[in-house]
């Protein structure tokens, strides 16, 4: 049985696997790490064209920052989303992609998921630095808010780890978890205020004659809360509500505990099934 | 003596799926996971391995020996039973596991080392030794995808062997690299043995296991057949793998398909008479009397001379020296003429065999078919198994030539 101490003891291994991920990601490509920045930038250009230019979605004016820029508004939500999506995908491939290792060497298997997520946290942080520079250029004095951003990043990382641990091991036993997840992620992308402002979501909606408190239900989604927290700290330059942060913390810790438990329960036969 | 590994009532079964079910839909429809049959790869096996010994796991393919090794290495988790290990365990199941082709040898050394349980500091301290042992000083900053397979394996082995475990588990990876590297590997194993490490080996190379191991466990269809001193257990195994065996009148073991047989093995001395003993340095002829039931194309005769402890001294056959006739029929004899037989005094056994040209199909195999003694002669040596007929010179009393 893997113990927590064993995972902590394998931190050198975790770090080396993280380095392997990072070093190998853009090897052999001429632009190398520039790709990790070009990717979100190209998405921003495309989405800005579609949503801002064609559909004429007006970005909300940042309060109290006074910022009014769709591309920056989009980036503040898109980067955290990309981190979430990439870490879930990375986790689902973490055990399967390393089957050779799992079958031949013993080490705490959690390490594979942790290092997959860790390498993406590092990428995410680099992207956030670039975003911070952009924010400064457009006149948002984001520097005092960066510690707050870091706190949200930590909470989101715990969230991603929990979901990642669970999905990684489930995907070993049922390969269609990853196909299911690609649909779920597609739905979740539009169920969060990434490409549109949250004020577009009506408080109530009547579906099949039943009136639902849509606004409240919508806000129960932790991803919505994450996006709003990042936007508050970076776009609006104000503290996210404390209740929201506590809500996210509770979600993340619960998900992590559940993910860890599921992983432990199912990891026993991973070397046979992978 | 302290126990390094204790295996108690270990059972490991695999699920053989009738129809592999890896979809949620099928699971929901069947309301359970796919039907499967349990296959007991390891079935209620118990034994103990004393610390500081070299232990072999032998058995046919599918006997569960590799599964058991993986259970000891904690890669697989047994359903029932417990395995206790004392000290740091390192498994050599695959060399260079986790190497990333795009990364340099240096990066991969750190990566692979940490996979095998070394901390960064420990790798720092051993790095030069690892590179030196692998003989890759010039290439350590080259991506491993540009390595030859020999270089790849050498680096992998070098890292694994430098993990410095208390217990080393090895699965048939000994036969790697060129001859020079293999010798380095064998030396390293002996070194580990002498420094009191416990080594567990799974291998088909029974000859090397016989010399390498103190004790051996023989597995058959997942069950423990025998455990004990290596020579005894391996001989039992060798005799068992051939189903058409029979015990001849002298208690030796014999198998083969019998299209041709070796009726008799004789030892002929210098005066042309059959004998059972001679002196070191005497000329001697080993004669195999054969009888073919049908004409056999290109039959290969072989002889092995072994000590009673099971060390094979020599194993010549007619194919190696290109002495294979196109066809043989009826009865006749084949001689191996040895001008000066330099075996030191002791008792030896001759195993005689008659194979087809591919040396995979046995017509007749007579294990330990003939026993003979060697007495003191010239050269008058007595240690080891063979005299090299050297002469002392320099500040000694020169031997008369």
Image (cartoon, coloured by chain):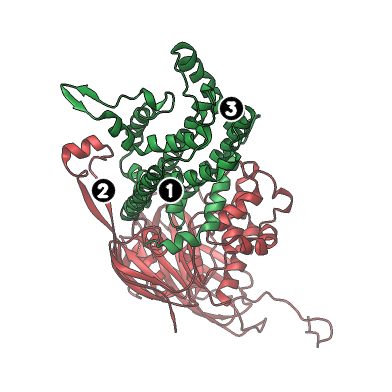
- Out of B173 and A78, give the one closest to the viewer: A78
Say which residue label 1 marks. A158
Using residue A228 as the reference point, say whether residue A268 is left or right of it: left
Say which residue label 3 marks. A38
- Out of B302 and A196, give the one closest to the viewer: A196
SS under mark 1: helix
Residue drawn at the location 49% of the way across and 44% of the way down: A153
Residue drawn at the location 31% of the way across and 37% of the way down: A220
- Out of A241 and A259, give the one closest to the viewer: A241
Q: Colour of chain B?
A: red
The chain letter for the residue carrying disc 3 is: A
The span from disc 1 to disc 2 (Cα, nearest Å) is 37 Å
Instruction: Decide if residue A249 is in sight here.
Output: yes
Mark 1 and mark 3, same subunit?
yes
Mark 2 and mark 3 in contact? Answer it, CB < 8 Å: no
Using residue B400 as the reference point, say whether residue B319 is left or right of it: left
């Amino acid at each position: 049985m893997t113990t927590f101490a064993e995972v902590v003891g394998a931190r050198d291994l975790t770090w080396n696997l993280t380095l392997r991920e990072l070093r190998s990601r853009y090897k052999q490509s001429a632009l190398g790490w520039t790709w990790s920045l070009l990717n979100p930038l190209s998405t921003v250009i495309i989405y800005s064209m579609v949503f801002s230019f064609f559909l004429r979605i007006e970005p909300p004016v940042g309060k109290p920052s006074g910022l009014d820029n769709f591309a920056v508004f989009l980036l503040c939500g898109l980067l955290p989303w990309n981190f979430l999506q990439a870490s879930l995908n990375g986790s689902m491939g973490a055990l399967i992609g390393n089957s050779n290792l799992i079958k031949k060497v013993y080490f705490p298997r959690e390490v594979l998921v942790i290092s997959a997520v860790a390498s993406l946290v590092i990428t995410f942080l680099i992207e956030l630095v670039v975003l911070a520079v952009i924010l400064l250029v457009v006149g948002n004095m984001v520097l005092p808010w960066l510690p707050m951003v870091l706190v949200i990043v930590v909470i989101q990382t715990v969230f991603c780890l929990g979901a990642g641990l669970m999905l990684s091991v489930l995907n070993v036993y049922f390969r269609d978890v990853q196909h299911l997840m690609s649909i779920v992620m597609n739905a979740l992308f539009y169920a969060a205020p990434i490409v549109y402002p949250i004020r577009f979501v009506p408080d109530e909606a009547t579906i099949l004659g039943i009136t639902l408190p849509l606004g409240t239900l919508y806000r129960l989604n932790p991803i919505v809360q994450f996006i709003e927290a990042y936007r508050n700290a970076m776009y609006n330059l104000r503290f996210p509500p404390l209740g929201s942060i506590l809500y996210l913390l509770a979600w993340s810790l619960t998900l992590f505990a559940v993910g860890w438990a599921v992983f432990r329960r199912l990891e026993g036969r991973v070397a046979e099934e992978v | 003596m302290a126990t390094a590994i204790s295996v108690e009532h270990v059972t490991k079964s695999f699920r053989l799926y009738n129809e592999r079910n890896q979809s949620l839909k099928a699971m929901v429809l069947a309301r359970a996971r796919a039907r499967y049959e349990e296959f007991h790869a390891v079935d209620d096996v118990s034994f103990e391995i004393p610390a500081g010994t070299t232990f072999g796991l032998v058995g046919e393919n599918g006997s569960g020996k590799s599964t058991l090794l993986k259970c000891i290495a904690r890669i697989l988790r047994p359903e029932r039973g417990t395995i206790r290990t004392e000290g740091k365990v390192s498994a050599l199941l695959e060399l260079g596991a986790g190497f990333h082709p795009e990364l340099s040898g240096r990066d991969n050394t750190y990566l692979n080392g940490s996979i095998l349980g070394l901390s960064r500091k420990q790798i720092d301290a051993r790095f030069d030794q690892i590179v030196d042992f692998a003989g890759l000083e010039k290439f350590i900053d080259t991506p491993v995808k540009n390595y030859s397979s020999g270089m790849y394996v050498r680096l992998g082995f070098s890292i694994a062997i430098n993990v410095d475990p208390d217990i080393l588990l090895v699965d048939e990876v000994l036969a790697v690299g060129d001859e020079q590297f293999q010798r380095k590997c064998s030396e390293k194993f002996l070194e580990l043995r002498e420094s009191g490490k416990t080594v567990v080996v799974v291998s088909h190379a029974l000859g090397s296991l016989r010399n390498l191991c103190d004790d051996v466990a023989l597995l058959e269809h997942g069950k423990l057949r025998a455990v004990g001193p290596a020579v005894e257990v391996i001989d039992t195994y060798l005799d068992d793998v051939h189903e058409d065996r029979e015990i001849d009148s002298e208690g030796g073991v014999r198998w083969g398909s019998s299209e041709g047989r070796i009726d008799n093995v004789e030892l002929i001395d210098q005066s042309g008479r059959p004998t059972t003993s001679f002196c070191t340095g005497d000329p001697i002829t080993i004669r195999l009397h054969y009888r073919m039931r049908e004409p056999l194309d290109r039959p290969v005769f072989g002889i092995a001379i072994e000590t009673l402890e099971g060390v094979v001294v020599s194993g010549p056959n007619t194919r190696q020296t290109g002495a294979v006739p196109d066809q043989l029929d009826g009865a006749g004899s084949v001689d191996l003429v040895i001008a000066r037989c330099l075996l030191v005094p002791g008792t030896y056994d001759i195993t005689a065999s008659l194979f087809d040209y591919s040396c995979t199909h046995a017509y007749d195999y007579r294990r330990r078919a003939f026993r003979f003694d060697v007495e003191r002669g010239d050269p008058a040596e007595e240690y080891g198994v063979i005299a090299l007929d050297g002469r002392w010179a320099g500040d000694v009393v020169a031997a008369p030539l």
